[in-house]
Image: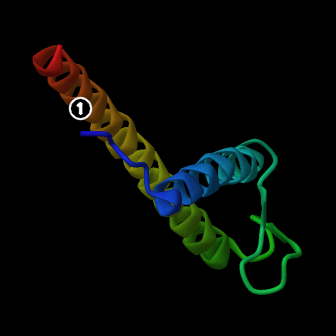
Amino acid sequence: MKIKPRPSLFLWTFICVFLVFWLGLDLWSGIYKGEIQDLRTGNQLLLENRPVWFYIVFILKLLAMMACFYFLVWRSTNSQCDIQKSKKEKAKII
């Protein structure tokens, strides 16, 4: 039995990899410089000007990044199980 990869999983994997890097850079800028890209306008949001909104945006982006990490870890463990199953099935056939 061949394992057929679903194209949607590949798409979501690439999206999550992109988001991890993009959100990671944005969160690092928030920690290091005290500025983060705003969700509503796309402008830079400074910690000194609007601290409450800064923390809300920071936490939302951190949660999104953690969800992407979770998906990537789930995807990698799931694919390893599939690879092991396919090796066992090939050994049974031979």
Residue 74: percent from the left, percent from the top?
A: 32, 44
Closer to us: 57 or 48: 57
Q: Quadrant of the C terminus?
A: top left
Point 30% across, 27% down: residue: 83
Identify whether 30 is placed above or below 1. Answer: below
Please report the residue visible at 38 percent of the width from the left and 44 percent of the height from the top.
Answer: 75
Q: Is 68 rendered above or below residue 93?
A: below
Percent x, y of residue 30: 72, 53
Residue 73 in the image: state x and y as whole percent. Answer: 37, 39
Which of the pair 42/32 is nearer the observer? 42
Give neighbour class at mark 1: few <14, some 14-19, many 20+ (Cα, 10 Å): few
Q: Which residue is drawn at 47% across and 56% down?
A: 9
Please state which amino acid type lies under the numbered disc 1: Cys
Q: How is the image coloured?
A: rainbow
Residue furthest bottom as drawn = 40
The answer to whether residue 51 is above or below residue 27 is below
Farthest residue, direction left = 92
Tell how many labels: 1
Q: Is mark 1 on a helix, strand or loop?
A: helix
Residue at (23, 32) in percent of width and height: 81
Q: Mark 1 points at which residue?
A: 81
Quarter occupied by the N terminus: top left
Observer-nearest of 9 and 91: 91
For residue 59, side relative to residue 93 (left or right): right
User: Residue at the front extreme?
Assistant: 94
Is 4 situated above or below 42? Answer: above
Q: Residue 3, image x and y in percent?
A: 33, 42
Q: Examine the image and state in which quarter residue 91 appears.
A: top left
